[in-house]
Image (cartoon, rainbow, N blue to C red):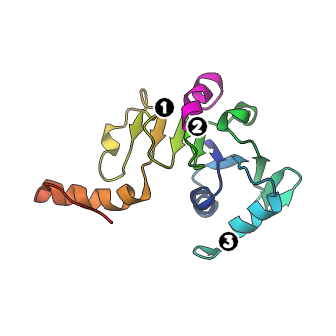
Amino acid sequence: MVRVGINGVGRIGRAILRVNQLKKYFDVVVINDINPDIDNIAYTLNYDTLYSRLDVLFRSKGECLVNDLGDCIQIYNEPHIADVDWSQHDVDYVIDSSGVLDNVKHARDLIEKSSVKRVFVTHSPNDVDFTMVLGVNEGELDINKHKVISTSICDATALGPVLNIINKTFGIDNGYVT
């Protein structure tokens, strides 16, 4: 199974981890977050006002998050994505949901100097190889060429597919979104 590291477990990082907990698309083996309180990270994962309570709860155990399914996720508290030794955990892909532009700038170094094959960024900075909006341009993704990939921003992800259909069917000259 693909091994993934998550850099930043704020709103988006937690949502990714929670969905993966239910579906098991990949193994999350490392989390890096500036919050040094692992008990607090476990609590915010387990209990969410929007997504409710997880069925299988996380708890802290030393420097790890563990659950009853046997998942053990190593926790780091480094300020920069480049300060984590992702290779030590054989991480294939890193999801950077920190929102920190400096981490995007260091993503390319991470790919060149470690086991990490790609970095997916959950916002839309300029320093990426490709910005993908599902339902709009995923067919243009070149996995041999694009290594730092933005998954765009929530507005584009929500509106892009709908506007793409409207544009192809009727055409759009201009518009505003608020």
Number of other residues with Cα within 10 Å of mark 2, as a class: few under 14, some 14 to 19, many 20 or more: few
Check if residue 111 falls in the magenta segment: yes
Marks 2/3: CA distance?
Answer: 32 Å
Mark toward the start of the polypeptide (1 vs 2): 2
Q: Nearer the viewer, residue 37 or 136?
A: 37
Q: Quadrant of residue 87?
A: top right
Indicate the amino acid at tag 2: Asp
Residue drawn at (46%, 34%) of the image? 127
Horizontally, residue 62 falls left or right of residue 142, namely: right
What is the CA distance from the residue labelled 1 to the residue labelled 2?
Answer: 17 Å
Magenta span main SS? helix
The residue beneath circle 2 is 102
Of badges 3 and 1, the one in the foreground is 1
Question: Which residues are drawn in magenta?
Answer: 102-116
> Where's residue 71, x and y in %?
75, 54
Which residue matches tag 1?
147
Label located before the other in sequence (2 or 3): 3
Report the quarter where the C terminus lies: bottom left
> In front: 36, or 6?
36
Residue corresponding to mark 3? 54
Rendering quarter of residue 4: top right
Residue kind at label 3, given as amino acid type: Leu
Label 1 amino acid? Lys
Residue furthest to the right: 62
Image quadrant in which the N terminus is located: top right
Q: Nearer the viewer, residue 5 or 21?
A: 5
Image coordinates for residue 79, horizontal then vertical, percent: 71, 42
